[in-house]
Amino acid sequence: MHETTSKPLALFGGTFDPVHYGHLRCADDARRQLNLESVFMLPAGQPPHRNPPQATNRQRLDMLRQALKEFPGLGIDERELDRRGPSFMVDTLQELRVEFPQRPLLLLLGQDAVNDLRRWHRWRELFVLAHIIILTRPQVITEYPIELAQQIHPREITTVRELQGLEAGRVLTLEVAANDISASGIKDIIGAGRSPGSMLPDSVMRYINQHKLYRPD
């Protein structure tokens, strides 16, 4: 493992179909706790572990751009939208490692995603390519099968300061603000002809209305 003085590059992946305040506030809260200038939202092109998005790649990207006007500390990395085939995180991290050989990479994952990490393509390599930042909430249960626990527990640290000087290989848990917002819940509300109100930025809701997204066929 190499020492480095480069600023960390942090990624927050998701389908963002649509992006909502649960995504945005969680990513921005993590950015502040990690003392970062920015966190990059990473929209998946073809998510391998869930149904295909209802909105197109372009529409999801447009909604993200609208939403981030309220969050200047968040950016966008579009590479998975441009890649053919399933959006495997290990491929993205490998690309970034080639581009930034000694830059710390921080992969921000919700606790639910980490609990299910063994389903991810070449999941063990994620720990070699990046630091894993687990975003948890009080009501979320930690459930690590033995094989996953063996990767996580030896790498665990307790403070942001312990990430300094290392490009990858640590696991840090951050508690972020609790929220009960989900993209599927928002789509159900819109599909029923109601408004999701304050669950997502007004600019995103205007875009959804303009393009008649998430309505019944």
Image: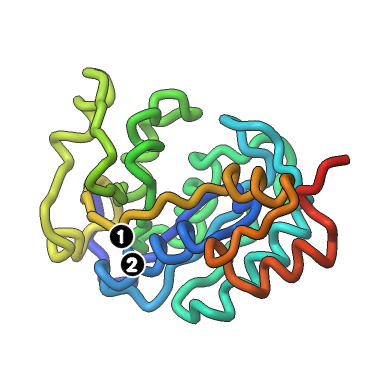
Secondary structure at badge 1 equals: loop
Callout 1 crowding tier (Cα within 10 Å): few <14, some 14–19, many ≥20: some
**Which quadrant does the C terminus fall into?**
top right
Instruction: Identify the residue position indicated by label 2 in the image.
Output: 29
Instruction: Give the answer, above or below, for where 12 lies relative to 110.
Output: below
Q: Is residue 176 left or right of residue 94?
A: left
* Residue 44 position in % (x across, y down): 62, 47
90 left or right of 155 in image: right
**Relative depth, front residue between 94 and 184:** 184
Q: Foreground residue, 71 or 146?
A: 71
Q: Is residue 2 left or right of residue 214?
A: left
Q: Are marks 2 and 1 in contact (CB under 8 Å)?
A: yes
Q: Which residue is mark 1?
A: 177
Q: Nearer the viewer, residue 12 or 53?
A: 53
- Give residue 175's position: percent from left, percent from top: 23, 55
Q: Alpha carbon of mark 2 to alpha carbon of mark 1: how far?
A: 8 Å
Which residue is painted at 43% across and 67% down in the image? 39
